[in-house]
Amino acid sequence: MKIKVLLVMPGKEPKVVKIPASIKFIKAFIGEKLFVMKLDQNTFIFADKNANFDDFNRIYASNIILGTFLIVSVKNKRRVSMKKKDIRRYINMFKLKKHQRKIDAYKEEFLEEYYSKLRKNKQKNAKRNKEEIFKMVA
């Protein structure tokens, strides 16, 4: 059975797609380790726990969602097609232009901090290597 879900990819607008309702397909499509976040009583986000840290997508409830994710409706513990009003609601909620500025700011801040840590670690390693070489020579 195929169901209607919202597919949200980094840098693109959300779009409605039809996918098989099985969790196996969702895991194959998104990633083996799923991160599930509740949007409302019957709607969930399925995202990849192992997404790249620099693959910022959207922001929801002070959480940065990384990588591609699906928005899926669930009823009686079964994945079902989303209703038209829910589709409109979540397309509007996750529009790219609403999130792009915040995502760019977080990304810039994160990458600056990340590269700063890399530089510090590189300097520590260089200093440690220098000391070890002097010990070996002496």
Image (tube, rainbow, N blue to C red):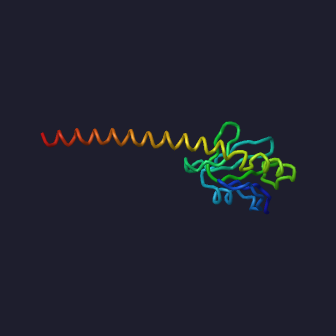
> In the visual, does 124 lie left or right of 90?
left
Residue situated furthest left in the rendering: 138
> In the visual, does 116 lie left or right of 15?
left
Which residue is found at the position 54% from the left and 41% from the top? 110
What is the number of callouts on the image? Answer: 0
Please determine whether, in this image, residue 137 is positioned above or below residue 29.
above
Residue 116 on image: x %, y %: 44, 40
Quadrant of residue 124 within the rendered picture: top left
Which residue is found at the position 87% from the left and 53% from the top? 84
Residue 123 on image: x %, y %: 34, 40
79 or 6: which is nearer to us?
Answer: 6
> In the visual, does 55 lie left or right of 130?
right
53 or 2: which is nearer to us?
Answer: 53
92 or 20: which is nearer to us?
Answer: 92
* Quarter in which the C terminus is drawn: top left
Quadrant of residue 32 within the rendered picture: bottom right
* Quarter in which the N terminus is drawn: bottom right
Residue 46 on image: x %, y %: 69, 50
Please determine whether, in this image, residue 137 is positioned above or below residue 9.
above
Residue situated furthest top in the rendering: 62
